[in-house]
């Protein structure tokens, strides 16, 4: 399974691309590799959302 790592500052289109790639492993059989890639993409998405100014991941 190919990995995705955006280059440079994360912009909203990059966030959309990460979101699209997160959905890919959801349709694959459950394996350790799938879980690792899914986790990596979720962390990347959270970082991109925080960089993009989103408040969703800030503690209350």
Image (cartoon, rainbow, N blue to C red):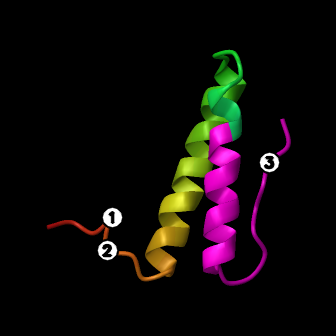
Left or right of 32, for residue 43: left
Quadrant where the C terminus is found in the figure? bottom left
Residue at 69% in and 15% down: 29
The residue beneath circle 1 is 57
Residue at 59% across / 59% down in the picture?
A: 44
Front-most of 31 and 56? 56
**Comparing labels 2 and 3, the label whose residue is closer to the camera:** 2
Instruction: Please give the name of the residue rendered at 78% of the width and 55% of the height, measured from the top-left corner.
Output: 4
| Image quarter (top left, top right, bottom left or bottom right) of the N terminus | top right
Q: Is residue 23 above or below residue 50?
A: above
Q: Decide whether residue 7 is among the magenta residues.
A: yes
Labelled pair 2, 1 in contact (Cβ < 8 Å):
yes
Give the side of residue 12 with respect to residue 2, left or right: left
Q: Position of residue 32 (x, y in %)?
A: 65, 21
**Residue 56 falls within the magenta-colored stretch:** no
Q: Which residue is mark 2?
A: 55
Q: Nearer the viewer, residue 23 or 47?
A: 23
């Amino acid at each position: 399974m190919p990995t995705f790592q955006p280059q440079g500052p994360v912009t909203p289109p990059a966030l959309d691309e990460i979101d699209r790639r997160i959905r890919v492993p959801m349709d694959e059989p459950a394996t350790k590799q799938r879980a690792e890639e899914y986790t990596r993409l979720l962390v990347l998405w959270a970082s991109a959302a925080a960089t993009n100014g989103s408040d969703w991941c800030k503690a209350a």
